[in-house]
């Protein structure tokens, strides 16, 4: 078996990929007609996907088997051992007399799915493959927009784009003027961002790519940044909270030679829905010629940064100056230099904390965050040990908030120390680390549920259990948050989620709500056929398109709950009307729209964490499932209800 990898490249479509994938048909009764060679012709539509491939000698001995599972039927190609999957063609069960059309092709590495083509719709990286979700152009099979992408993956896309001088690829992870409206930005901040967006044109990008002289085999090595910062609504004219990374950088490496590496300065990254985007162009020096004089600058935090500024003001100028230098060294450190630079900054923060008791909580928390960030990136593996020692120091502290913060960082770092280990851990080792993490987190929540870190951990456990459909466990955690933080928005959302879960098997009670454009939202009036409460947002257009197709059959009522917040909280009724009229245009269902978005009355009463989120109600008005997370999953439940 060999690993098939396609590095940064502009893909050319050969004959094997010219197959009209949407026309593939699968017969569950005559799977013998499919040969391994036929199935192996189907390649991932996207570059940068590593999947297992049998050798020419192994291919004839691979096995093709039909399957029916989870609302799908299809064929699976196994390695010669008969148990290790290589490809799976998935098709929804066809209507009587029709052929099953392939909807998904799933690709595997080491026996686990890492990538999925949802044909003509999405490309998805899953499990160890990553977390990206990209919208695909049905004709070109290329990504046209990222529906979800992490900061790490977004910066890897930036490196790939620069390596191949692919401006289109860069634009997909670059902040746009349209994003500014979505984020509710205005005033001088929006003007400065507009200036940087305009400067990040094709000309400037091409000049940067040429100046960087990245080697042909360059690869993304690591993402380095301060912990993410949330700028609250109201500050700097923001209409809603804005989450950013500032003064961020990435390590780029030549092939597998970690000694040939240097930093590329990314600057600011902004979270837009589930995707992270860069502000303007990155900066850097020609590969192999770095002097360290280039540095990132931040639109949001032009000063040195919270950690250094806090240290300078702590009353010890000499150590504060050392800490400033340590952070600068950390920004410029290569992967081999990073552990020592991180440890120095970590120790200096603790020294300052010991000498300045009034700043202890802030400085120790910063030290814990720094060590955790290093472990999470894989560049400071011994940081987990440092956090364990720090947690031991504070285990008897009367400062519950600080004690909880350090312990929470330690628990999470212990998991990442295994997950980010090199060489990559075995699946069994990773599974054991995940199990221990879940157990430690559950114990932590029992002890620290009333602290800020405890609430964060409890919410994480609740959501994880919901996604695993462990509703009793999720309800228990939501209940804790609701009881401990009853007046906070987090507590109110948790109470809503709890009520939603407890409604399964009974009727769902909603607060009074009116549809946009007129009419009362009355679930009782919809009895007679199934109803889907469809919580959607403009940042998830694929699910909206899928729901349109499903609703077109007329066998399902759809109640839309829009989760887009009004960009300008002071907008007039006329402006709000125009905003939501454009959002809901072309939808065949009625919508409840709230200027508060995810924090709106109905979203809060249902405890909705994100989009898409669906509550399925049967024709008698009883809740069948309160946590359907995709239209695809909804279709499966509807099929079972017939």
Image (cartoon, rainbow, N blue to C red):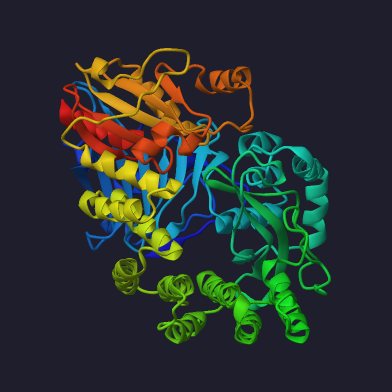
Residue at (36% x, 16% y) in the render: 520
Q: Position of residue 310 (x, y in %)?
A: 69, 72
Residue at (25% x, 42% y) in the render: 501
Q: Position of residue 594 (x, y in %)?
A: 49, 28
Q: Which of the image's four quarters has the N terminus?
A: bottom left
Residue at (71% x, 54% y) in the render: 162
Query: In screen coordinates, is 320 left or right of 601?
Result: right
- Above or below, 583 against 431 in this view is above
Q: Quadrant of residue 476?
A: bottom left
Query: In screen coordinates, is 220 left or right of 264?
Result: left
Residue 462 seen in render? yes
- Above or below, 378 against 276 in this view is below
Q: Looking at the image, which residue sits at the far top? A: 518
Query: In screen coordinates, is 84 left or right of 270?
Result: left
Q: Nearer the viewer, residue 294 or 463?
A: 463
Q: Which of the image's four quarters has the C terminus?
A: top left
Query: In screen coordinates, is 586 left or right of 624?
Result: right
- Above or below, 53 against 144 in this view is below
Q: Nearer the viewer, residue 360 or 530?
A: 360
- Above or below, 108 against 364 in this view is above
Q: Position of residue 112 (x, y in %)?
A: 33, 59
Q: Position of residue 376 (x, y in %)?
A: 51, 70
Residue 120 seen in render? no
């Amino acid at each position: 078996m060999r690993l098939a990898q396609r590095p940064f490249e502009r893909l050319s479509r050969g004959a094997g990929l010219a197959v009209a994938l949407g026309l593939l048909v699968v017969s569950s009764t005559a799977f013998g007609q499919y040969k391994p060679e036929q199935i192996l012709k189907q390649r991932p539509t996207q570059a940068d996907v590593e999947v297992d491939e049998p050798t020419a000698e192994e291919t004839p001995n691979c096995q093709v088997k039909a399957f029916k599972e989870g609302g799908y039927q299809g064929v699976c190609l196994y390695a010669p051992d008969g148990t290790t999957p290589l490809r799976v063609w998935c098709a929804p069960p066809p209507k009587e007399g029709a052929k099953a059309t392939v909807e998904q092709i799933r690709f595997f590495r080491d026996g686990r799915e890492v990538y999925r083509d949802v044909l003509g719709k999405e490309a998805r990286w899953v499990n160890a493959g990553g977390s990206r979700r990209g919208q695909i152009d049905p004709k070109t099979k290329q990504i046209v927009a990222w529906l979800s992408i992490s900061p790490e993956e977004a910066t890897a896309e930036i490196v790939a784009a620069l390596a191949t001088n692919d401006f289109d690829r860069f634009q997909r992870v670059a902040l746009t003027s349209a994003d500014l409206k979505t984020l509710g930005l205005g005033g001088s901040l929006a003007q400065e961002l507009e200036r940087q967006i305009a400067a990040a044109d094709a000309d400037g990008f091409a000049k940067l790519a040429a100046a960087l002289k990245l080697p042909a085999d360059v690869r993304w090595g690591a993402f380095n940044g301060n912990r993410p910062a949330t700028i609250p609504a109201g500050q700097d004219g923001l209409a809603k909270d804005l989450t950013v990374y500032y003064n961020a950088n990435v390590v780029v490496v030549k092939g597998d030679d970690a000694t040939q590496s240097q930093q590329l300065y990314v600057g600011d990254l902004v979270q837009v829905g589930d995707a992270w985007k860069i502000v303007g162009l990155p900066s850097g020096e020609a590969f192999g010629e770095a002097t360290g004089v280039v540095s990132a600058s931040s639109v949001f935090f032009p000063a040195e940064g919270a950690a250094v500024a806090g240290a300078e003001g702590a009353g010890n100028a000499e150590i504060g100056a050392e800490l400033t230098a340590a952070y600068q060294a950390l920004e410029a450190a290569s992967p081999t230099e990073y552990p020592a630079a991180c440890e120095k900054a970590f120790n200096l923060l603790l020294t300052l904390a010991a000498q300045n008791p009034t700043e202890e909580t802030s400085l120790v928390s910063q030290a814990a965050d720094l060590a955790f960030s290093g472990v999470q990136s894989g560049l400071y593996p011994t940081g987990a040990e440092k956090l364990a020692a720090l947690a031991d120091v504070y285990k008897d502290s009367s400062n519950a908030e600080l004690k909880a913060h350090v312990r929470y960082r330690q628990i999470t770092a212990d998991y990442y120390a295994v997950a980010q280990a090199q060489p990559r851990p075995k699946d069994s080792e990773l599974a054991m680390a995940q199990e221990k993490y879940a157990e430690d987190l559950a114990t932590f929540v029992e002890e620290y549920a009333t602290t800020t870190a405890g609430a964060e951990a409890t919410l994480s456990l609740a959501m994880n259990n919901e996604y695993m459909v462990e509703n009793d466990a999720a309800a228990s955690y939501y209940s804790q948050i609701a009881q401990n933080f009853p007046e906070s928005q987090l507590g109110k959302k948790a109470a809503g989620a709890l009520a939603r879960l407890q409604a399964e098997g009974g009727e769902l009670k909603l607060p009074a709500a009116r549809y946009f454009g007129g009419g009362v939202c009355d679930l009782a009036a919809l009895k007679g056929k199934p109803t889907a409460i469809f919580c959607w947002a403009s940042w998830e257009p694929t699910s909206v398109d899928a729901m349109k197709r499903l609703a077109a059959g007329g066998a399902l009522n759809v109640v839309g709950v829009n989760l887009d917040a009004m960009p300008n909280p002071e907008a007039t009724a006329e402006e709000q009307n125009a905003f939501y009229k454009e959002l809901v245009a072309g939808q065949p269902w009625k919508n409840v729209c709230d200027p508060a978005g995810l924090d709106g009355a109905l979203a809060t009463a249902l405890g909705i964490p994100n989009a898409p989120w669906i509550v399925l109600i049967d024709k008698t008005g009883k809740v069948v499932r309160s946590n359907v997370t995709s239209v695809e999953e909804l279709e499966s439940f509807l099929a079972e209800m017939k």
